[in-house]
Image: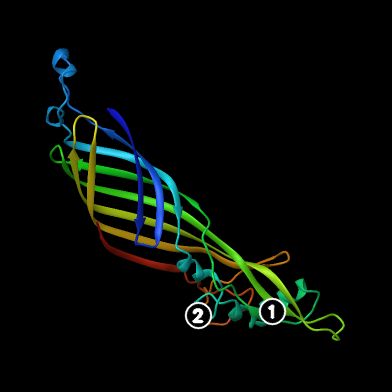
Amino acid sequence: MQLRLIFWFLALFASNSFIYAQYSFHREKLNYFNTETNRKKTEKNEVDRRGLTFGLNMGVFKGSSEQATYYNGSDRNENSIKYFINNTYFYNEIKQRLNQRDFTLYSVPSSMSYDMSMMIGFYARYNYNNTTGIFVQFNFSKLNTQNQFALKVDSVTFTSEPALKYFPVYGQEERTYIDLGLYKDFYFGEKTNFWVEGGFSFNNTIVKKNGIMVGDLDLSIINVYGNRPYVPNTRRNRLRIFRRCRFKPEF
């Protein structure tokens, strides 16, 4: 088997990008009984590249800032900070961390951005001739984002203006990408080649965390209750949040 290292750089959906290295293992049919012939092999047709190629993908991933605003706690999102603050039980928990001072939501961040994250995956290709094959690859990444929201907190003496206090709002998601398509190799001499791929790309995103922190209180704002009000210490079926699942042609 021959070990080959390939470096990729490409844009995904014109909004996300990643860079990763791909290690591929190729099965080659060589005539080891004819050593003289093996030393003279220089053309691509003299090596049988048909069959299975597999490898590992590993690299870094940067998500779109536009998509990260899903976690900013705005009223436009299904996970809203205001929805939880308006709930008596959550309001009282936050109030305890603010020395029993009343408060209102002042602002949420207008923008969010993902941290750089690792992407890992698996790649497999089956060549039915020396230059053409079909491929499938699975890539996985966990993304994190964080910014600050503001609360307007009443003063202690009630003689001064309310103070603005800033606290973290954060999100975490898991993304899975599945690519399926055709592969075509083009050779230029013994050691130079490039390839093109085309097919379909499927992706799925699962929201793992979306919350705020006020003092030692770490409060999830994922709305798993639907339109039902939250009541502590009650058993209710919770909803699992899938942010999106889609596929598109990829060339």
**Residue 134 in sight:** yes
**Residue 105, position as x, y percentages in the image:** 66, 80
**Residue 240, above or below 19:** below
| Colouring | rainbow
Can you identify the residue that label 2 sits on? 76
Quadrant of residue 147 within the rendered picture: bottom right
Dots 1, 2 in contact, CB < 8 A: no
* Quadrant that contains the C terminus: bottom left
Q: Residue at x 54, y 67 (%)?
A: 112
**Residue 243, position as x, y percentages in the image:** 43, 68
**Residue 52, position as x, y percentages in the image:** 22, 38
Numbered badge on residue 91: 1
**Residue 230 in sight:** no
Task: Tell whether 230 sits left or right of 141.
Answer: right
Q: Residue at x 64, y 82 (%)?
A: 87
Dot 1 or dot 2: first in sequence order is 2
Q: Residue at x 25, y 53 (%)?
A: 180
Name the front one of labels 1 and 2.
2
Quadrant of residue 95 within the rendered picture: bottom right
Identify the secondary structure beneath mark 2: loop
- State the CA–CA distance, disc 1 to disc 2: 20 Å
User: Which amino acid is tagged 1?
Assistant: Tyr
The number of numbered discs placed on residues in the rendered structure image is 2
**Residue 81, above or below 136:** below
**Residue 151, position as x, y percentages in the image:** 69, 77
Tell me the crowding category of disc 2: few under 14, some 14 to 19, or many 20 or more residues within 10 angstroms, Cα based. Answer: few
Tell me the crowding category of disc 1: few under 14, some 14 to 19, or many 20 or more residues within 10 angstroms, Cα based. Answer: some
User: Which amino acid is tagged 2?
Assistant: Arg
235 vs 147, nearest the viewer: 147
Residue found farthest to the front: 188
Identify the secondary structure beneath mark 1: helix
